[in-house]
Image (spheres, rainbow, N blue to C red):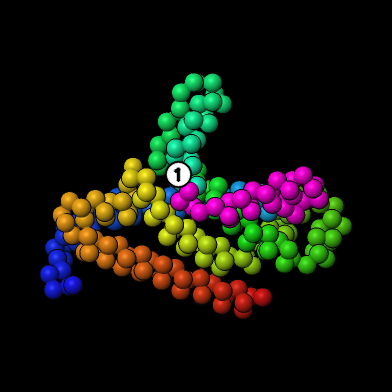
Amino acid sequence: MFYNFDFDVIERSWYYLITTGLKTTLILTFWGMAGGIVLGTMLAMMRLSSSKLLAFIATAYVNLMRSIPLVLVIFWFYFLVPYIAGWITGAGTPIPIGGFQAAIVTFVLFEAAYYCEILRSGIQSIPRGQVSAGYALGMNYWQMMGNIVLPQAFRTVMPILMTQTIILFQDVSLVYVLGSVQEFVTIANKVAQRDGRLVEMYMFVAVVYFVLCFALSQLVKRLQHKIAIIR
């Protein structure tokens, strides 16, 4: 299969693939992670809230998102949301939403469900005595969470958060189904179709994903070891 492997097509295209495609993939990963962690933290606090209504809403949301394939959610936001936005605003016609913006919204909302469960486990791992001590010092709920519980919870679950971010980085490749977002796999496919070199391009993509994900996984292992020593 490799007797006529053409390294020249990789040499001609790698810079464009990295600076445009991989850059877009990393941007989508960053915003999906940042927004997902913020929303996931809010959902985790809702799930642990004494309000049954807030807990029910957060639980229903998390269970819904974790039960639906990500590729289906991507299609939802790309094709269905413009109609919903047009109906809400009374525009009468669908409001166009770009593929890049739709992808960011999708990853934030989808990943928040997974970050929520990770952070919820971190919050529940904090001894109740520290919570009681915070209240005894005169702190309110938000001061206690912000100064005592959440910093420790984040440190405890940081390796798991990074692992989920690695999964998110891999999942960004599913945006390929839209065709309008110039992420890594989409651009590699266009180059492969143009030059008729599918094996070379997809091999290059696989190597890049492997190198980055393997390096990040080693970083997670070191972080786990460091946290274990601290604790």
Viewed as shown, does residue 213 lie left or right of 126? left
Q: Does residue 143 appear in the picture of this structure?
A: no
**Circle 1: is it few (<14), some (14-19), or many (20+) Cα within 10 Å?**
some
* Tally of marks: 1
**Residue 172 falls in which quadrant of the image?**
bottom left
Q: Position of residue 120 (x, y in %)?
A: 68, 59
91 shown above or below 207: above
Residue 194 in the figure: left or right of residue 160: left
Quadrant for the C terminus in the image? bottom right
Pick the front one: 19 or 175? 175
- Quadrant in the picture for residue 223: bottom right
The answer to which of 79 and 187 lies nearer the viewer is: 79
As helix, strand or loop, the secondary structure at mark 1 comes to helix
Q: Position of residue 55 (x, y in %)?
A: 74, 49
**Furthest residue toward right:** 136
Q: Is residue 67 left or right of residue 216?
A: right
Give the residue at x 21% y 64%. 200
User: Which of the image's four quarters has the N terminus?
Assistant: bottom left
Q: Which residue is mark 1?
A: 75
Residue drawn where x is 48% and y is 48% of the image: 72
Residue 213: in magenta span: no
The answer to whether 225 is drawn above or below residue 8 in the figure is: below
Residues shaded magenta:
46-72
The residue shown at (67%, 49%) is 60
Residue under the point 49% across and 42% down: 76
Residue 56 pos. (x, y %)? 73, 48
What is the magenta segment's predominant secondary structure?
helix
Image x and y of residue 143, in percent:
75, 51
Q: Amino acid at mark 1?
A: Phe
Would you say residue 49 is visible in this rendering?
yes
